[in-house]
Structures are given as structure tokens and as C-alpha cells.
Image: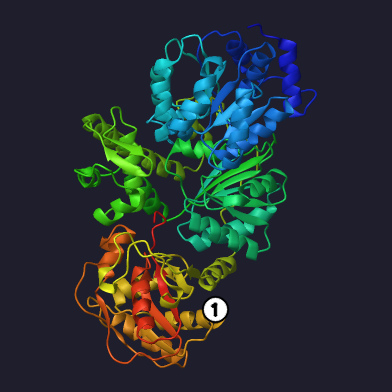
Amino acid sequence: MNYNALRAVELLRFGTQNPRADFHDGQEKAIRHVVEGRGRLLVVQKTGWGKSFVYFIAAKLLREQGAGPALLISPLLALMRNQIAAAERMGVRAETINSENQEEWNDVEAALARNEVDLLLISPERLANEHFRAEVLGPVAGRISLLVVDEAHCISDWGHDFRPHYRFIERMMRTLPPNLRLLATTATANNRVLADLQTILGPNLTVSRGGLGRPSLLLQTMRMPSQAARMAWLATHLPGIRGSGIVYTLTVRDAVQVAGWLQSRRIQAESYSGETGERRVELENALLENRVKVLVATTALGMGFDKPDLAFVIHYQTPGSVVAYYQQVGRAGRQIPEAHGVLLSGQEETDINDFFIESAFPSREEVESVLSALQGVAAGLSVNEFLSRVNIRRGRIEKALQLLSLESPAPVVKQGSKWILTAANLSDAFWQRAERLTELRRVEQRQMQEYVALTSGHMEFLIRALDGNPGSGHAPNIVPLPATFEDGLAREAVAFLRRTSLPLEPRKKWPSGGLPGLNVQANKSIPPERNYQSGRVLCMWGDAGWGALVRQGKSHDARFADQLVEACAAMVRTWAPQPAPVWVACIPSRRHPNLVPDFARRLATALNLPFHPVLEKSDDRPAQKQMENSSQQARNVDGSLRIHGHVPTGAALLVDDMVDSRWTMTVAAYLLLTNGSGPVHPLALASTANTDE
């Protein structure tokens, strides 16, 4: 194919909406390389360089010369939405098939078959879908003119954001015709990742690698162990930064909590995570159009979110690796002269990142349990059926099955909703990879703590860690943000955390396997008249509001402080459950027989209600925290509680200290309601629930 330089510049100016735009160093050379079919190309360039324009313009030029459509494999939906909008400005007919637009799949497939699609964007998970491979990709595979692999570091298991389904791309490489145009792009490929990609994407891979320095971005780090201190710092300094930006958190709970705090300080903030659902597009657009000051986001708003004038990226906790941090902080200052990248290091981040590292791969015991459960079950097992057979969390079961199914040969395969054992054995290479990458993540975690300790040279540190030229990392002439904040704001942040509470919603169905002790069947709906009402939880275990005081009472004092009694009484008055409770009960424990009854009795006194200890433990069971999934937790409670004495008829407040799976509350409420109680309103001091469930 011929390269048309004038048309390429014209398309660039359409796409950027800038009539004077010109190519960055290396952009036009990369486009020419692709269009003229000079072989496979890997582009490693910093965020904001314009990697997407390379494949948009190349795809458009190829289509205008009669070539077939381009296929783009991209990891995040936010990235897809950004890219489709940019492509349309150039006249590129871009469509996507992903988990959020199922109602459009038939139309997209039909347009693709009619050759009316210039660029099809898919997630790597689509490649695992048999229908997509056979019915959508199969008929057009011979016409595809260009395969683009965006965020190509995800292919490499050395990469900071390895995506298991990207392994399908590695398998595709072995079957692609040698003359098919291949373009891979990433901003974060150190030498280790680069060597891996050269092996996977070869043969004869050309690498275009640019500098990593960001002259408009000032980087800072500040150690602030307390959540309240970090919240106070954000409330102090965000209003003074011109423009809008992102605050990254490691957990969904923190994203919601920090956004709520900023809203209470009259700062336009919204939370954004994988749980945001239908509002994700709305919130992305609000940030793009500067209608919000800040999105407080998890990494769901990560790779590829493109806002050229993003003024700041602030991390509420330290990410797990330098490359992940560079990827995220690099959202800021792409086309503005001044931007801030601030990392606020907190005491909880080590535990959170440890959890991420330890949960990245299943343990040998988990894999053995999963494979043993499938032995002799010819029809296979669904994930729900696994839950009743193995004491492993749902997310861990799903991860183990997914990773095992991506091995070659795979010891398990999925047919419909069932997982079936194959004749293949799991190779030692699986465990060698897991051990190697777990150790790598530990090294990366330590490297990030070195970064946190820096007082200067932050950009140079990141560039060196990414095997770039540190000479390109000079700090810009921007006034740093101070590490100070008002003490009064920190106290107000603690008060805010103590005013918030968590909902405690009832479970909808009985678990897989049922509960023989209650004579209820598996997966049947729990009748509303035998279920508790929506309740309240005072805090998260160990958080900066009441969580630390709950931990102190549970783990050290063997008695909950009077402050917690007062806080729960105030929460009940604000909550005002209806019908109003007229008596108080509690969940008993044989390990700590006085802890919860003592608290419930004092809470009843504060509410001027009678306390009736009508529930008792009938036998000893393992602690609920030893039960790893919902079915096992339900079974552990089944038959362990019984009614002792007369149950009052009015509405009850049912009190416990910790809540996780909610099965203890569910069974206790069922017993109370079956024995004559009025509606049951549950209350717990703290939630220890794992987001995995």
C-alpha cells in the first residue's frame, strides 16, 4: 500500500480538531511503517504522545485504498469509549463488541459482514468466546488488514497489569500470516517486558521507543499514615489547583468515602469504580468537560483515559508498582504547561497491596481442591456447586478456573455454565510462573516504598525504573504543593467518618446445598416474612472513623467502649427503622460469651428498650472467618443457634459485633421470626466483608 503524507496530516488535524496540528517525533514514521507493510511494529511511547492516532490514521489510509477492516484489542471500556469518539472525528467507522453493549452486538456483526466497519474494538476476553471466534471473527479473518494490540504490556506476565486473556494473543501470533500488519502499543515496557514482547510478537519486530520524561508534570510524595490527615490535605489543596483531575484509591470503599467527604466540603467530586455501572460514561464525560472538579477513582479509570488538560493526579494510597504508578500519574499534564502528580502514602496500603499480591494466583491447596472436586463428576460443576464442595472464596475459585483454563494444554474447560476436567495435567511451568511473578510483585512493592521516601528526583526515579534515559526527567518549574493542612480539618474528617454508616441488606436466597438444620432448600428465595429488614453497620473494621475503637474493644479490651454505645444509639435514632424496635436481642458467642451481650445490654439501656438474650449457641463451630465462601459460612451457622426462652412479639433490634457473609444474621433472624418476633432490624459494629464475595 502507498503512504499519502498529505492525507495523513489532514486526518491528524481532523482528529485533534486543530488545523495547525503536526505529528510528534516518530508518529508519522510509525504510520508509514504500518501502511507500507514493513513488518510488525511495537511502539513504546509515553502517555499523551498519541499512540491512538497512529492506528486510527493507518487504518483509515488502508481502508481508503480498499483494504479490509482493522481489529483493535484493548483492555478497558473507558479507553474504547474515548477512542471511538476520536476515531469518528476522522471519519473512521469504529464499532465495539464488549460486555456493556450486548444489545448492539447483532447490528455490529451485520455491519462487519457488510464491510461497513473500518475498525472493530474488542476486549481480550472476547477472544475466549467461541461464538465470537467462529461466527464473528472467522468470516472476516482473511480480510483483516491490521491487527492492533493496545496496552501490549498486558501480554507479558512481567508486565504490571498482566491480563490472563491476553495469552490468547500469544497463541494467535503463531497462526497469523507473516505479512499481516501488526501494531502493538504501550507506555510502560521496561527491558524485561520488552524482551518478552519481542519473543511473543516476533519475528522481525521493529521497536519504536521514545523518551519518558514529562516536562509539565511535577511529582511529589508525602507520608500521611492517617486517612483523616489525607482527607484533610485533599480538602485543603484541591480547591487551589486550577482545573480538574483524578484522585486514585486502592479500594472501592475508599473511593466512595473520599468522594463523600469532598462533597461535604463543597468540592465537586464523584466516585468511580467497577461498581459505578451505568453512570460510568456520564462521569467520564463530566470530567472531560470539567463539570466535576475530581473523580475519586479506582483503577477502573486507568489505562487510556484521555483528557489532555487533566490538571492533577493524586494517589490516596501507594500503588503496587512503579510502572502502574507511571501509567496512572501520566494521565496528567499532557497538553497543559503545569500539572501535579502527588502520592499520599497511608498506613493501610501495605495490607491492601499484600492482599492483591497474595490473591493474584491460587495456592497449590486451592488448585488441588478445585481439581479434586471435579474428579468423577462427568457433567462438571458450576461455580455455585463448587462453593458447597470446597472451602474457598468465590473469587478465588473463579480465578483458579480461569487461569487453569488458559494453560496449554488446559486441565479444565468450560462448557456452558459447567467446568469439566480434561485429561491434561497441570505443568510445573504454571507454578514456576506464579512464584516468579509473586516475588517480582514484592520487589515492585519495595521499589514503590523507595519512591515514597524521595525528597527530589521523582521523575528520574520512575524513568530509571522503566529503563529509560533519566536525563529526560528534570523537574518542571512549578511551585510544589505543601504537605500541611489544618488540624481542624483532620478532626472534621474523623467526625465525617464517624457520621457515616454502611447499609446491611438482607440476603435474597438460601445457599447452594440448602440448610438442613432449618429445613430450607438450596437456592430458594428467603421469604420476606422470615428475613430481616435492611439494617446498618457502624463502620469498616479498623477504619479511621470508629473502626480502630472497635478493633481495640474486640482484640485488646474484651469490652466495647461507651463511645461505641453512644455512636450506635445515635445511628439508630438517625436511621429510625420502621416499625420501631421495642426490644433488643444479640448474637451469642461461646468464645467471647460476654462481649456482645454486654454491648447489646448497654445499647438497649441507651435506647430505653428491654434486652432479651433469647438466642444461644447450641454447640461449638469454627470461627466464621475460617470459612472462605458463602455456602461454607451458611453451613457453619446452620444448627448452631437455638431459641432459649420466650421471644417477644414486637419489632426487634438484633445486635452483633462483626458482620461478613450475613449468614449468622440471616439464620438468627429466621429463628426469631419463626418463633413469634416482629420485624427484625439488624445492627453490627463493623463489617469485615471481603469485596470478593
Name the foreground residue: 35 vs 131: 131
Amino acid type of disc 1? Trp
Instruction: Quadrant for residue 513, please give it.
Output: bottom left
Element class at badge 1: helix
Tell me where residue 308 appears, x and y as whole percent: 67, 36
Question: As drawn, which residue projects farthest toward the right?
Answer: 19
Residue 159 horizontal/vertical position (percent): 41, 32
Q: Which is more toward the observer, 82 or 239?
A: 82
User: Is residue 517 at all visible to an observer of this figure?
Assistant: yes
Q: In front here: 160 or 556? A: 160
Quadrant that contains the C terminus: bottom left
Vertical placement of residue 262 versus 357, above or below: below
Closer-to-camera residue (101/440):
101
Is residue 473 left or right of 281 when viewed as pictured? left
Point 63% across, 32% down: residue: 83
Q: What colour scheme was applied to this rendering of the protein? A: rainbow
Please report the residue visible at 47 percent of the width from the left and 38 percent of the height from the top: 324
| Residue position marked by numbered label 1 in the rendering | 575
**In this image, 433 relative to 570: left or right?**
left
- Check the image and report above or below for 200 versus 590: above
Evaluate whether residue 198 shows in this view. Answer: no
Residue 273, above or below 530: above
Percent x, y for residue 339?
Answer: 64, 41
Image coordinates of residue 385 in percent, x first then y, are 30, 52
Apparent side of residue 471 relative to residue 520 in the rendered image (left or right): right
Few, some or many residues within 10 Å of mark 1 (<14, 14–19, 20+): few
Residue 132 appears left or right of 242: left
Which quadrant: the N terminus?
top right
Identity of the residue drawn at 68% across and 52% down: 293
Q: Quadrant of residue 565?
A: bottom left
